Amino acid sequence: MATYKISVNNKLVTVNADADTPLLWVLRDHLNLVGTKFGCGIAQCGACTVHVNGSAVRSCSFPIASVGSYKITTIEGLSADGTHPVQKAWEEIDVAQCGYCQAGQIMAASALLKKNPHPTDNDIDAAITNICRCGTHYRIRKAIHAAAAEGATK
């Protein structure tokens, strides 16, 4: 086991974990940040998406030893009060059905909008590869467009 000092949601934290421990489990089990969900464990579904230096990353396959000085942002750190434009758009459009994948979807969408403030449907489809088992992809796309209209680039 090794000791890692990592930046999570703009706070420096110390974690003792094996080098190959996925960031997902460090967040959930060591830091009690349970908004990031376990879905598949093989980086396919996207339920575990977080930001690593502003880019969407599937935390289930990102080992703690790879974090280094990168800044990690989870759904809990996206905004202090749930008022990030993507979160607001999700509520306004009523995107969530079961809701399990939504934290990962929101993190992927906010990373996309930071890089591409006015994505087309094709841009969204290419960037948001997270799986929604309930089939809310149409509402997800609509919410991303709504957030883009509000200037969701933070």
Image (tube, rainbow, N blue to C red):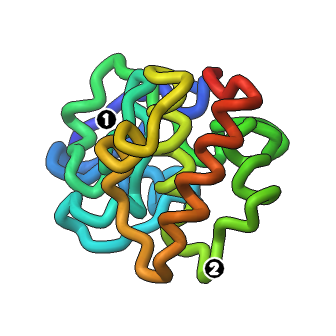
Residue lying furthest top: 69
Query: How many numbered circles does the render carry?
Result: 2
Label 2 element class: loop
> Residue at coordinates 53% horizontally, 53% vertically from top-left?
141
- Provide residue 143's location: percent of width, then percent of height: 65, 51
Tell me the residue that label 2 is attached to. 97
Q: In the rendered view, would you say 44 is above or below 67?
A: below
Residue 25 in sight in this render: no
Residue in the picture at 36% in, 49% down: 125
Q: Disc 2 versus disc 1: distance between alpha carbons? A: 39 Å
Image quarter where the C terminus lies is top right
Q: Earlier in the sequence, mark 2 or mark 1?
A: 1
* Nearer the observer, 152 or 59: 152
Q: Quick check: 48 left or right of 73?
A: left
Residue 90 at what x, y percent from top left?
70, 55
Residue 148 shows up from this direction: yes
Is residue 45 positioned above or below 85 on the image?
below
Residue contact between numbered discs 2 and 1, judged by CB atoms under 8 Å: no
Q: Position of residue 49 (x, y in %)?
A: 40, 50
Residue at numbered disc 1:
3
Q: Please tell me in which quadrant of the rendered image residue 46 appears.
A: bottom left
